[in-house]
Image (tube, grey):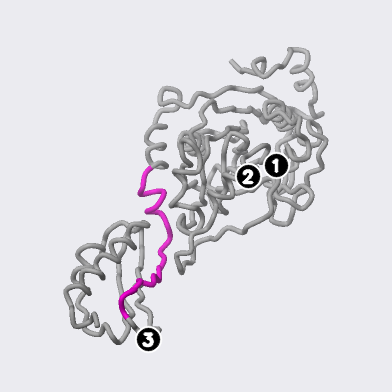
């Protein structure tokens, strides 16, 4: 059933893992799931399915997967200030997807040089540092690199971030997931996370930018496949941890299992995937924000006064529009056209184009303003 042989294990090697037992009775099973999908929405759905449906009381899971190029924002973030929305489709041959995960924290970039890990357990057995120490030990064994855990519980190497971390705590289940930069395309990462200057005011969680490093920069011979094996073995051989009373539970390693995420194996997965890939989740879930946009008036001498459109956006829709107009434009009747074309519409980068056209048409119809 389990595919540890596909990863290059021999029975003798695997039995070595099983033989590392604690002196007390084993009572927590541990399995490493490896997703065959590289679609971010499928893997987010798989993680969510396990979180909602799996019984982790006596069986913990480490889920690992890789992604095709994508930007993944946190549950409480604003994509317009976290990602280069205008250019994502042009950064790689097939573009860079935008996704929102169901955990907090900041924005991360995934591609095939990035490994994603999700530690799933009960809430009581959740412990970030315990999980990060597993990864750190595995990297030292496989690559000879000394990884540190900083105060923010990120993994760092020579002062550079190699992993970001986030979590979702529920009842009875929880998960801690993190990225691991192994050989990611840093140029694509930089372009994808380039911030747009949209003058947005918001209480949304904002990412803390950090200097990053690929593990391959320190060890060019690093192999993602081997690292998956080493992390998986270290996970299974490490006793499970309960955060509240700091007790450790011995465990029974269950091996590696390849997962082909499908509706047949995980009933309801398609519906969860549809949710994660929907506009309503990716953009509509954005916390309320206000955009202050300077409307260009190139043919008018406004004596330095600006024409400012103030848009309030809630659930991804423009719910309120206000203007600060130069004295020269006092009496300009644009409210009705703006409301009819923009109010309750989706906010996106085309909103500014529509706004400009409305102003241009209004000015053309008011010859007295154009002097």
Q: Is 259 located above or below residue 176 in the figure?
A: above
Within 10 Å of the Cα at label 2, are there few (<14), some (14-19), or many (20+) other Cα atoms? Answer: some
Give the labeled residue for mark 3: 303
The spot of residue 185 in percent (x, y) is 61, 40
- Residue 256, by quadrant, is top right
Q: Residue at x 18, y 78 (%)?
A: 366
Residue displayed at 61% across by 31% down: 59
Q: Is residue 74 left or right of residue 318?
A: right
Whichever of callouts 2 and 1 sits on the residue coming sooner in the sequence is 2
Q: Which residue is mark 2?
A: 186
* Mark number displayed over residue 126: none
Residue at 32% x, 60% y is 351
Q: Provide the secondary structure element on which disc 1 rests.
A: loop
- In the image shown, does 58 or 159 lie closer to the viewer? 159
Mark 2 vs 1: CB contact within 8 A: yes
Query: What is the CA distance from the residue labelled 3 to the residue labelled 1?
Result: 52 Å
- Numbered tag placed on residue 214 in the rendering: 1
Q: CA distance from mark 2 to mark 3?
A: 45 Å
Quadrant placement of the C terminus: bottom left
- Vertical placement of 291 versus 280: above or below? below
Frontmost of labels 2 and 1 is 2
């Amino acid at each position: 059933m389990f595919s540890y042989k596909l990863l290059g294990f021999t029975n003798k090697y695997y039995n070595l893992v099983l033989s590392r037992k604690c002196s007390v009775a084993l009572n927590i099973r541990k399995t490493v799931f490896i997703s065959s999908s590289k679609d971010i929405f499928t893997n987010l759905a798989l993680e969510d399915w396990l979180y909602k449906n799996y019984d982790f009381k006596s069986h913990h899971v480490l889920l690992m997967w890789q992604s095709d190029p994508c930007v993944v924002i946190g549950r409480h973030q604003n994509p317009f200030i976290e990602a280069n929305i205008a250019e994502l489709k042009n950064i790689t041959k097939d573009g860079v997807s935008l996704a929102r995960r169901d955990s907090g924290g900041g924005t991360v970039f995934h591609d095939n040089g990035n490994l994603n890990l999700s530690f799933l357990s009960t809430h009581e057995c959740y412990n970030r540092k315990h999980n990060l120490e597993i990864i750190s030990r595995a990297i030292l064994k496989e690559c000879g690199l000394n990884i540190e855990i900083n105060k923010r519980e990120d993994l760092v190497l020579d002062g550079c971030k190699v992993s970001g971390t986030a979590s979702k705590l529920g009842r009875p289940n929880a998960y801690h997931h993190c990225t691991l930069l192994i050989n990611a395309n840093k140029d694509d990462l930089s372009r994808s996370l380039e911030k747009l200057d949209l003058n947005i005011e918001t209480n949304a969680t904002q990412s803390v930018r950090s200097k990053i490093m690929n593990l391959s920069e320190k060890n060019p011979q690093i192999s993602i496949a081997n690292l998956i094996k080493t992390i998986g073995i270290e996970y299974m051989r490490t006793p499970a941890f309960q955060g509240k009373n700091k007790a450790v539970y011995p465990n029974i390693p269950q091996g590696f299992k390849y997962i082909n995420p499908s509706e047949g194996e995980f009933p309801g997965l398609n519906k969860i995937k549809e949710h994660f890939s929907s506009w309503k989740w990716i953009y509509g879930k954005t916390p309320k924000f206000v955009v202050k946009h300077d409307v260009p008036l190139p043919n008018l001498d406004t004596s330095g006064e600006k024409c400012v459109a103030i848009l309030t956006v809630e659930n991804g829709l423009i719910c309120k529009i206000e203007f600060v107009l130069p004295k020269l434009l006092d009496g300009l009747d644009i409210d009705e056209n703006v409301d009819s074309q923009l109010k309750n519409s989706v906010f996106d980068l085309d909103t500014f184009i529509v706004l400009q056209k409305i102003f241009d048409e209004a000015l053309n119809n008011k010859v007295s303003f154009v002097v």
